[in-house]
Image (cartoon, rainbow, N blue to C red):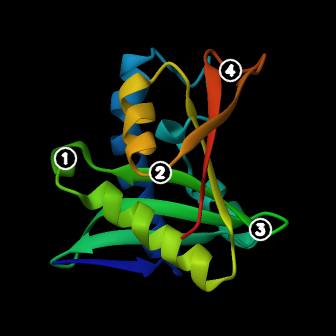
Amino acid sequence: MSLIKELTTETELETSIKIIADSFATVAAEFKLTKDNCPTHPSFVTIKQLMEMKRKGLKLFGLFVEGAQFGFVALEKKKDKAFSMEKLAVLPEYRSKGYGGELVDFVNNNVKDAGGKKLSIGIIDEHTVLKQWYKSKGFKQTARTKFEHLPFTVCFMEKPVV
């Protein structure tokens, strides 16, 4: 049975760095992302970045099974009852077991409890498998943007919170 809880200590965030980095390493390898061509990619996350996210008011959550963490997600309150989900991560060996969906449902329920109406994400547009997975979770593509500093196109998606 899994447990999702808010991460509040620096020690918990340090554990999360490895979870995020290892989870996103598969994406970095697939799309040939490096610290040089994409230093902000989650596979290169630092404790300083997570602490800054927390300082800015993002809620950081870990997914645990039998006391061991192997998932992560961050939630940011935007404006007009909108929220953004960031850095959803599940270690590769635990994928395809429903844990990513549990994290999405957990975030959706958090947003709903906070009076939110919309949940948004940004992903690599060319990552078609991930895009299809998010569509299966109720997200719809709202925009595509090519940023000069990124070696890929960003696909923005959102879903109504129900």
Q: Quadrant of residue 157?
A: top right
Q: Quadrant of residue 35?
A: top right
Q: State the separation of the CA atoms marked 4 and 1.
A: 28 Å
> Callout 1, which amino acid?
Ser
Q: State the separation of the CA atoms marked 3 and 2.
A: 28 Å
Residue that numbered label 3 is attached to: 56
Q: Tell me whether circle 3 and circle 4 mark residues in contact (CB < 8 Å).
A: no
Q: Give the mark nearer the N terminus: 1 vs 3.
A: 3
Taking depth in this image into account, of 120 and 160 the one nearest to the observer is: 160
Residue 76 at what x, y percent from top left?
A: 68, 64
Q: Tell me whether circle 1 and circle 2 mark residues in contact (CB < 8 Å).
A: no
Inspect this view and state whether residue 15 appears. Answer: no
Q: State the separation of the CA atoms marked 3 and 4.
A: 23 Å
Residue that numbered label 4 is attached to: 150
Residue 36 at what x, y percent from top left?
A: 61, 19
67 displayed left or right of 31? left
Q: Is residue 154 above or below residue 54?
A: above
Taking depth in this image into account, of 148 and 15 the one nearest to the observer is: 148
Quarter of the picture containing the N terminus is bottom left
Outermost residue toward the bottom in this view: 113
